[in-house]
Amino acid sequence: MENLEDGKDKEKTDEGLVKILKNLTDQERRLLIRQLGGTDRSAIKKHRHHYPKNHARFGYMSDSHIGHKEFREDLFVKACRTYVKEGIDTVYLPGDILEGMSGRDGHIYELSHIGFSAQVNYAAELFGSFKELQFYAIDGNHDEWYVKKNNAGLIVGEQLEEKVDNYHFLGQMEADVVLAPKVTMKLFHGRDGTAYAVSYKMQKLMESMTGGEKPSIILSGHYHKHLTMWNRNIFGVECGTLCGQTPFMRGKKIPAHLGFGLMDVWYNGNGVQRVDHTFFPGYS
């Protein structure tokens, strides 16, 4: 027999939940439902972006660090206008979309936009101003500061996806994009420090991958460097940055390779047959 007191407690709980849900915005309700779904955010997500025929053409830009004073808005705009002019409608971003709030001494004085709302709204305005483009992005370690600092749990990509129709969140730190059968492109964002040899991090990343999980292409962020490398049948690209040298980088003697790029990939049933790559330096 049901305990009457238990029934009353349940009724009060249900009424309380209904009251809470009524006070939430549609965006907040969707976010709550997504978070209660119990999905493993650490899992590497796989997305299928099938391009027509045997050719994929897309742009890339990385490490914008929107909210930092060194973020180059002019370079972001130049990149987007270049893609539109080139007839490209898809752009991939391998992380560090926002600068975040590290909490380290003095960091706040490096910011043009302080706090999550200011940074995410600024980013939404930028991405939303280029409706001709579809942006596909992962979060990087700077974006993760909003998850981990004070256990806030804010997922930058989810928030931007809610705010901007042409922004698509692929995952945190890493995601796989299937361009065609036997052609997978990995978006990757590192967590470690830079190396004196520019090629070292990409080389070690390629070497760390087992045969069965190797992608055909890697777009890598985090190190603010630009390079291309062919190794183990993988075409790897360090994607550069849209953020100038920060005081932290200056102190560590780390340069920033400003710029953005585009790629043409041709493939058949056996995999990638040809890759053409163009990089646009940020100083030009």
Image: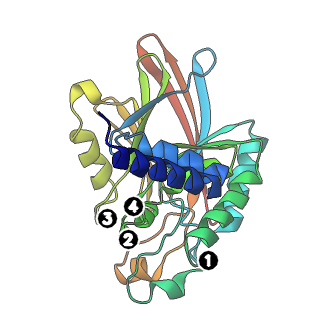
Quadrant, the C terminus: bottom right
Q: Is residue 260 above or below residue 196?
A: above
- Circle 4: element type: helix
C-alpha span from label 2 to label 3: 23 Å
Instruction: Residue under label 3, please give it.
Output: 194
Instruction: Residue under label 4, please give it.
Output: 141
- Circle 2: element type: helix
Mark 2–mark 4 CB contact (< 8 Å): no
Tell which circle, 2 or 4, labels the residue nearer the N-terminal end: 4
Quadrant, the N terminus: top left
Instruction: Residue under label 1, please give it.
Output: 113
The image quarter in which residue 176 lies: top left
**Amino acid type of the residue tagged 2 in the rendering:** Lys
Residue 41 seen in render:
no
Tell which circle, 2 or 3, labels the residue nearer the N-terminal end: 2
Instruction: Residue under label 2, please give it.
Output: 149
Q: Position of residue 233 (x, y in %)?
A: 33, 29
C-alpha span from label 1 to label 2: 17 Å
Residue 78 relative to residue 61: left or right: right
